Each structure stands twice: as C-alpha cells, then as structure tokens.
Image (spheres, helix red, strand yellow):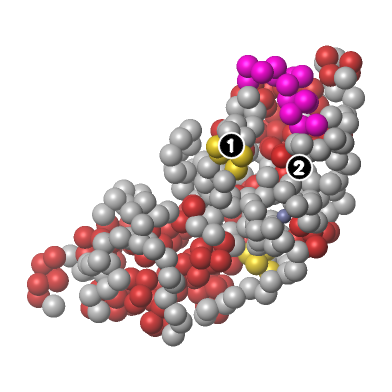
Amino acid sequence: MQGLTETLWPIRYKPFDDELLSCWLVRLAHGHGLKVQTFCNLLFGNRLQVWNRDIDRLAPAWLLRELIARTGTPRARAEGTTLRVFEGVLYPQFKESGNLLWVLAAQVYHRQRMGNAQQFCARCLAEDEIPYFRKTWRVALKTVCLRHQCMLWDRCPKCEVGVAFHRMDMGRPYVPENGALAACFRCGFNLATAPAQPIQILEQPAFDLLADSVSSLDAVSVDPSASFPSDRVVVLRHLVRLMLSARRTVELRGFVADRLGVEDLAIGQGKRLAIESLPTATRHVLLQFGAWVLVNPEARLRQAWKSRAIRYNHLLREFDAAPAWYTGIAEQFSEWRDRLA
Ligand SMILES: [Zn+2]
Ligand SMILES: [Zn+2]
C-alpha cells in the first residue's frame, strides 16, 4: 500500500489492445493485491466515486490523469481505452447523459449495472493469457465475434445476470487472483467456458454487409485512423429505429421479415425503445433486417414504400445526418410522387 503514494506504482500494467478502461483499472487493483473498491478509495478518496457511473463512457479526466501518471502509460494509449474513441465514428459528438448512438446503455444504479451492456466472446476470453474485456463489446452494432465466428454473450449463461467484473470481489473475503476477471460476479461461473453459439445468418449478403461493418469497427477501435463506413452505419441505425417505431404506419420490420421468410420479432413497441438497450439476440436480427435493406437500398425501400410499409416522411424524419445518397433515394418517394403513384 505504501507504494501507492509513490509517483509510479509498483504494478504498471498497460492496457491490452482494445481493452476497456474499467477492465484495466480492475486489473491494476488486483495486481496490487487490493479489492477494486479499496484501491479506488485509496487513490481518490470517497469524494470521487468511480463505480457509480459508466467510466468507460464518461472517461473522467481525473481518473485518466492518475492512471497515466502512475503507470507511465502514454496518454493516447490510456485515452484509447474509453468509448470516446468512437466520437465522430459511431456518434457525431460525445455527450455525458442520454442515449449515445450505438453505445450499449449501462444503466448504472448505485454501483450496480442493470441490463446487459457488457457483451463478451467466451472464446476470446479463453484464448487470452489474462482475460480482459474489449471496448467493441460495448457497441450495439457488434453482436458477433468475427475471429471466432460465434455470437457474443450478453449475460452469464448460468445465472443470466449481466456482466459486472468490477463487482466480483465485493462481499468476498479475498482478493481475486490476477486473471480471474472472466468469472461471473454473481455465481462465479467461468465466462470463458460459455459454449460458443453459432452465428444465426438470415441471409448471406445481408449478414456479409453487417460483418463488414463489424470488421471496420474492430479495426477503428484499435486504430482511430482506420476507415469506417459511417454513412452506411448511420443509415443502418435509422432503419433499425424505424423498425422499432411505435407508429402504426411504419411496418418496415414486418415487411422485411416477410421478405426474408422469417418470423417477425416479438418486441413490445415501447415508445422509447432504442437498439442500445436491447439484448444481443434481438439486435442481431434487427441489424440483419436493416442490412438486408442496405444491400440494395433503392429497390428495397421502393418495394417497402409501394407496399405501404413506409412513408416518405418517415425516411427523413429526425434524421439530420442522412447522407446525400440516402436522401436522394428518399426524395423519390416524396409526397407529390406519392400522389401520382
Ligand atoms: Zn472471440
Ligand atoms: Zn453467473
């Protein structure tokens, strides 16, 4: 404990590729033989609470400053552990509260994380020498691990509780061994041994389009200069939003399900349903529905429009960031043409 007051800590782990800030912090605590809460209290006192907020999203400057100074980690590398790296990629501008596009909502309630915002690939965890959690596992766009060709999990397969690795040492008399982060905090199940579920592919071209976007996400998460198909992904989210719309005049989801010959999803048409708070399995289907439209957007949106599954005004409503190619397609279905049709 003495060592914690020194400029550099005795343990100076650096973040792994794509590692999340919270995971890095927990590893540092355990590396020092301390519980997460004890470690954070020693560093920041009771004044600055670490775990009652989504630090991966908020990236508090005081926290990063401390980690950079005490571990000798280059600033860019430390800052690269937060979900802010997706600013200008997945969402136009960072904001502290409210829904952040494509970032799974952690819904922190007194240090407890409700929901299933922390996905994981069991095989990635199993392969890691030291299991750790990735930034991309917090992104709603990603439902699969391309490296292992399997679905991501969004909860413990045994007790079905969401992942909260920062809580695993709470209420336990011992400090977990380094490398124990893959254990479910609630029931202790080793998440790395969760069975690999095969990817459900509704239609190959649609899945390929989605997989290509996920692959770009993986690249940009470790190298911010990598290219990312922002135009396509912003339209994909708008299409998914339409498919979650509570308006009875929007039947795009049913339309696509019908075309793909699959059953429509049974999701309550809640008013504020956003893809960022849906379980992985549901998102996986919705994203493929949206990707199916994007494989041939002009023809498929026209079919949907002709079938009255969508109206012109829905296509552009609350969609300021619409790219020109998409607006061009939507304009073909404007009201006056609608009347002539
Ligand atoms: Zn994997
Ligand atoms: Zn469990």
Residue furthest bottom in the image: 261
Give how far across and how far down residue 215 sits, in percent: 62, 61
Give the magenta-colored segment's residue range. Answer: 35-48
Identify the disc placed on residue 168.
2
The amino acid pointed to by label 1 is: Asp
Give how far across and how far down residue 142 sits, in percent: 58, 59
Query: What distance separates the C-alpha of mark 2 from that of mark 1?
Result: 17 Å
Work out which quarter of the rendered image holds the N terminus and state it: top right
Q: Is residue 339 above or below residue 280?
A: below
In magenta segment, residue 246? no
**Residue 56 as seen in the image, left or right of residue 273:** right
Q: Secondary structure at mark 2?
A: loop
The verdict on label 1 being within 8 Å of ligand 2 is: no
The verdict on label 2 being within 8 Å of ligand 2 is: no
In magenta segment, residue 39? yes
Q: Residue at x 53, y 78 (%)?
A: 202
The amino acid pointed to by label 2 is: Met
Q: Which residue is mark 1?
A: 54
**Residue 272 as seen in the image, left or right of residue 175:** left
272 vs 284, nearest the viewer: 272
Q: Residue at x 79, y 22 (%)?
A: 70
334 vs 50, nearest the viewer: 50
